[in-house]
Amino acid sequence: MNVNVRSVIALTRLAVPYLEKTKGNIVNISSIAALRTSPLTPYYSVAKCALDSYTKNAAVIYGSNGIRVNAINPGTVDTDIWKRSDDPRVASFCDKLIKETIVDRMGKPKEIARVIAFLASDEAAFITGSCWLIDGGAMVTPSYFGQS
């Protein structure tokens, strides 16, 4: 909760005066874990649910000040966190997650960054209070996170 929610709230409060002047916006980084059960990481899932809720509430709170607030909910992304673990259960879990996406692969950091850049741009000026799912179709497969 400290890393995934409280830090975002504190940083948002600190950034608001600058964002009001510049008509800036916020893109929070949530997770697909906020949207489905995650038996291996239930507390992470709860924290990301809280972040999604905060994102929507912050959009309402700060919207009248010209600040847009959105989030992205990535699925499995090919980052170093998967490579750092020497625990075979992590590799097995990762393989399972990949197989249960429609695109049969992890997302690439660049694919996530493009959506963040879009949401932060003027092209997304009418988008606020939303959480964008970027998961390679995982949420529409019933067996993702071990559900069937």
Image (cartoon, rainbow, N blue to C red):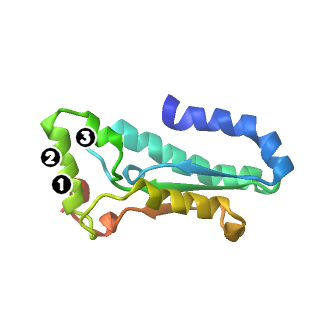
On screen, residue 3 versus residue 75, left or right, reads right
Q: Secondary structure at mark 3?
A: loop
Q: Which residue is mark 2?
A: 92
Of helix, strand and loop, which one carries label 1?
Answer: helix
In primary-sequence order, the first of circles 1 and 3 is 3
Three-letter amino acid code at disc 1?
Answer: Lys
Pointer 3 local density, CA inside 10 Å: few below 14, some 14–19, many at least 20: few
Residue 10 left/right relative to 146: right
Q: Decide: few, some or many residues near mark 2? Use Cα within 10 Å; few <14, some 14-19, many ≥20.
A: few
The nearer-to-camera label among 2 and 3 is: 2
Image coordinates of residue 101 in percent, x first then y, are: 26, 65
Mark 2 vs 3, N-terminal side: 3
For the question of whether residue 89 can be seen, the reply is yes
In-image side of 98 versus 114 (left or right)? left
Q: Secondary structure at mark 2?
A: helix
Callout 2, which amino acid? Ser
Q: Position of residue 55 (x, y in %)?
A: 60, 50
**Residue at left offset 30%, top offset 47%:** 38
For badge 3, the amino acid type reads Leu
Task: Please give the residue where the numbered disc 3 appears in the rendered image.
Answer: 40
Marks 2 & 1, CB-CB < 8 Å contact: yes
Give the labeled residue for mark 1. Answer: 96
Q: CA distance from mark 2 to mark 3?
A: 13 Å
User: What crowding class fits label 1: few (fewer than 14 Cα within 10 Å), some (14-19), or many (20 or more)?
Assistant: some
Residue at point 51%, 29% (across, down): 2
* Residue 41 visible somewhere in the drawing: no
